[in-house]
Amino acid sequence: MAGALGLALLGGCVSGDGGSGFGDRASALPPSLAYRLTQSLTTEVGPRLAGTPREAAARDWAVRTLKDLKFGRVAVEPFTIKGWAREREEAFIVSHGDQALAVTALGGSISTPKAGITAPIAFVASYDDLLLAPPDAYAGKIVFINDRMKAARDGSGYGVAVRKRSRGAIEAAKRGALAVAIRSVGTDNTRFPHTGNMNYDAAVKRIPAAAVSNADADQLERLHAMGVPMRLKLVLKTRAIADAPSGNVVADIVGVEKPDEIVLLAAHLDSWDLGTGAVDDATGVAIVVAAALKAAGPEMKPKRTIRVVLYGAEEVGVHGGDAYAKAHAGEIANHVLATEADFGTGRVWRFASKALEADLPFFDSVAAGLRDLGVERGDNKSGGGADIAALAKKGVPIVGLSQDGTTYFDYHHTANDTLDKVDAAALEQNVEVYARVARAFANR
């Protein structure tokens, strides 16, 4: 059973039978179940960095909660990853009075030397400009990549901006840099730096990598515009964790007519360690759990199995998505649909798909049933989401439900990703949209 704090947050008994936990049937679910789930996960567990004891605590939370909600089958499917953790992060503009910058190590970054790295800043306007620089252009310097991210409802600014985070260290090292710092991949103007995973290339020297808050990046931009030489001191201490435990939590509401056919609802259970992972992705966890129950109906008897998969280790390399696809290779052909919630709490505004031409009339009819919720029909080119990408590649039909991401990247991967950012009303609209989609495919 869930702990005492969890029961209090989740409203205790919801069946009206005087018992404890969530009660016996989804018919008694309170309207605020999704919010209460979000609140419970972010409060009882908090940050859930992949491969750490906090991610393990999140798996334990999920198993207790899903069993309490009377899912028919609940299991943890373990796997291991190369883990990582931060221990210290500091940065100062030493050329200008040791001005402290709000900075965070990028996920996977190596440490600086114990005393840090102090060097001139090579100010690079964009990632594309970095690629144009010749070899050794930044020898002996710390490269700072400015590149601003643009806010957009569909989050389209992310793909361009995230390049500097993903490959900035590789490309800067090719050009002789001692370290790389980037303007945070985010759309806020706060002093909350945005972390996120970065990559190394085995053929290129590894250098430390950090993100500077957008407000402090503005300060560096102003100093650069003045033509003033700048020197930065960067101190990062991180550690690698070999064979760190992770895992996916898989829960089924078993179908009564075609139990081997699966409608999969996905979210990821892990989060970065700076905030409490509310909009990324506790809300997604809450949406798919609540939607599965709502789709199954009061008697919990959908025709096909509705499966919730709460993936592990998404943030550090989508390891859970790959692990699920391998573990369930023998039944991938039985997945009649996969959809994912991993874009915060904004209202769903678009239904996209990836389906065979012959199936499009049915997908169109499902989309039409969402118009009253403000959802428009999108194209048939959806990837669905990071965790279900491996399923999409193997031909599993996909529905991508686009949430309004206009403000999502204000909080994404920051210490400011906390429960107060969750829009409870929009969360309920999400639950209704996901439930209608799941119900339609489960009972088709």
Image (cartoon, grey):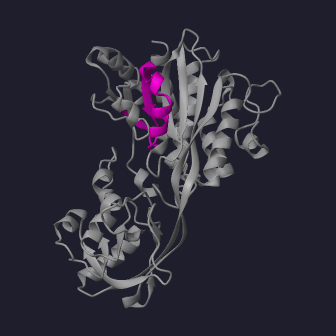
Q: Is-magenta flag for residue 324? A: yes
45 lies above or below 236? above
Q: Residue at x 50, y 81 (%)?
A: 114
Q: Which residues are magenta?
A: 322-350
404 w.r.t. 158: above or below: above
- Between 290 and 312, the one nearer to me in the picture: 312
Residue 342 position, x and y percent, is 46, 42
Q: Quadrant of residue 167?
A: bottom left
- Residue 395 seen in the current view: yes
Q: Position of residue 156 (x, y in %)?
A: 30, 48
Foreground pick, 398 / 180: 180
Q: Could you tell me residue 9's position as x and y percent?
A: 71, 43
Question: What residue appears at the point 65 percent right and 53 percent down from the top-left corner?
Answer: 53
At which x and y percent is residue 84? 52, 60
Q: Residue furthest top?
A: 257
Asked whether, in this view, residue 126 is left or right of residue 237, the answer is left
Tell me which residue sits at (26%, 69%) in the image.
Answer: 174
Whether residue 142 sits left or right of residue 312 in the image: it is left
Question: Would you place residue 352 above or below residue 112 in this image?
Answer: above
Q: Quadrant of the N terminus?
A: top right
Left or right: residue 302 versus residue 95 is right
Report if residue 334 lies within the magenta region: yes
Q: Which quadrant, please, contains the C terminus?
A: top left
